[in-house]
Amino acid sequence: ADLNLQEIHDLLVSVAHEAGQMQLSATPSYLSSGTKKNSADLVTETDQAVEKMVNTRLLKSYPTFQFIGEETYFPGQTLTAEPTFICDPIDGTTNFVHAFPAFCISLGLAVNKTPVIGVIYNPYLDELYTAIKGQGAYLTRGKFGTKEKLPLKQEPEPLKDLSTCLIGAEWGSDRTGNNFDLRAKVFTKLAASKEDGGAMVHSIRSMGSAALNIAAVAAGQLDAYWEGGCWAWDVCAGWCILVEAGGIMVSANPGDWEPTIEGRKYLAIRGAPSGQKEIVEEFWGVIGEGR
Ligand code: LIP
């Protein structure tokens, strides 16, 4: 049956606003927050409470849909072609517990393993990013604020090369072995001067939320975002918003132009009249063989 994407989108926006209220009224502590894989991988009661609310509300209206959420995910759970809600109840949990104002809920719907709706809400700044496949991407600021079409600069500049880019990149929570070495290498190569063999980008930002990084690329505030190792719930919503804003998502594995939601390696490039492909290839050169 044909899905009413507008109706689902409106429900996701309503759920995102309720989640934002829960996030703002919580009083998380970084000393008492729980950890998952290691001491830099944080989780709070609010992450769990928000996911429970989201799951309950969405499956009440759409009981036949699948649901993948960060807090209830189990190894072996896979994305199928069925309509699937993909939810990160708090993307940027580290920021959340430190009261650094860059966290959000990220809510996506994937159908046939393709993101078709994306809703990202940063309650602290009251910024709502939304998209429905084929219908453009938008940023709504504040209750009485304006709804702006993304990218914010309606005539974005061409992408020249990495040296003129502002890049989003993250350290993530896995600080061991090859993963860590690759991140350290990419950060260094992006930042270093050309004489030292680097790309000498304008600068690198680590916002601490994959979804907000991707939203910033969609808005044209960042030129590219790279992270190896994040999950479907970090990227599904942002992916839809990015593509609707003219951006592209490729894999961080050199040569892979058609990444999957579950691939765990992502490189997002903003919309531009030219230069997208060249920037991807230059970035792949910096990443090297991937991992
Ligand atoms: C986090 C991301 C962050 C990334 C971490 C982690 P969480 O999500 O958004 O950008 O570096 O690897 O995935 O755990 O706050 O939902």
Image (cartoon, rainbow, N blue to C red):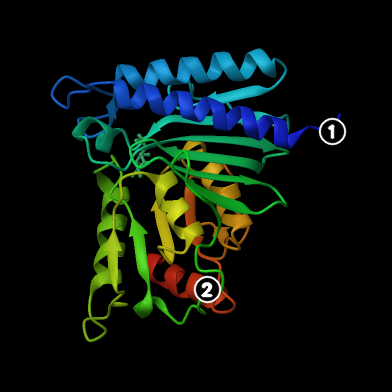
Q: Quadrant of residue 274?
A: bottom right
Q: Is residue 94 visible?
A: yes
Report, in whole angstroms, how far the alpha carbon at label 1 lies from the one at label 2: 35 Å
Q: Does label 1 or label 2 sit earlier along the sequence?
A: 1
- Position of residue 281 relative to residue 64, above or below, is below
Q: Which numbered marker is on residue 2? A: 1
Count of picture labels: 2
User: Looking at the image, which residue is at 65% across and 54% down?
Assistant: 136
Residue farthest bottom in this picture? 195
- Circle number at residue 132: none
Q: Residue at 29% of width from left, 41% of height from top?
A: 174
Rendered-image quadrant of the C terminus? bottom left
User: Mark 1 or 2, which is nearer the eye?
Assistant: 2
Mark 2, residue position: 156
Q: Would you say residue 252 is visible in this rendering?
A: no
Q: Residue at x 57, y 62 (%)?
A: 247
**17 sits to left or right of 185:** right
Residue type beneath disc 1:
Asp
**Disc 2, SS:** loop
